[in-house]
Amino acid sequence: MKLIDTSFSLIPNTLWGKAKEQLYHAIIQNTFSLVGLILESDRNYAGTRPDISVFTKTHIYVLELKLDGSAEAALKQIFEKNYFRPFQTDNRKKVAIGINFSSEKKAIAEYKVEVLEGIKRGKI
């Protein structure tokens, strides 16, 4: 989260304009790509489309982003829309991350992380 927040802090105010969620999404995608992470952004799976999925040797991270919303709403969406379904047979550990950005501060306002112990939220 510090890496993301630092990236945002380096962007001059004059370049933000009326930034939408897509700009925050693009900055995260580019930041993660530059540090060598393997990721998918807005990948359409059958019936679901996570904002960002990050893949390491040991973990799969699913990120849902909100602008001027709440980290809890973002985390809730991950499970309501079953974003981990495409990865249910993958043995890597799963981590859900909901991030809310503040358009006023141009920063991460809050985030919530939930490590899954198997996929146990009532859906396959």
Image (cartoon, rainbow, N blue to C red):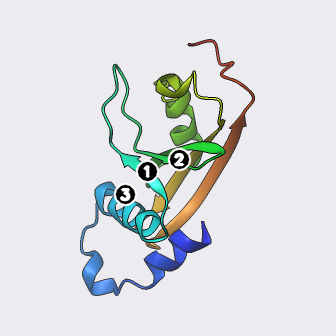
**Quarter in which the N terminus is drawn:** bottom right
Q: Secondary structure at mark 3?
A: helix
Q: Residue at x 65, y 18 (%)?
A: 121
The amino acid beneath tag 1 is Leu
90 relative to 21, above or below: above
Q: Which residue position holds label 3?
A: 25
Comparing marks 2 and 3, which lies closer to the viewer? 2
- Name which of mark 2 and mark 3 comes first in the sequence: 3
**Quarter in which the C terminus is drawn:** top right
The amino acid beneath tag 3 is His
Q: Which residue position holds label 1?
A: 39
Say left or right for 102 vs 79: left
Q: Nearer the viewer, residue 105 or 24?
A: 24
Q: Which residue position holds label 2?
A: 55
Count the numbered circles shown: 3
Comparing marks 1 and 3, which lies closer to the viewer? 1
90 relative to 99, above or below: above
Q: Residue at x 34, y 20 (%)?
A: 46
- Within 10 Å of the Cα at label 1, are there few (<14), some (14-19), or many (20+) other Cα atoms? some
- Name which of mark 1 and mark 3 comes first in the sequence: 3
- Whether tag 1 and tag 2 are in contact, CB under 8 A, the answer is yes
**Separation of disc 1 and disc 3 at Cα?**
12 Å
The amino acid beneath tag 2 is Phe
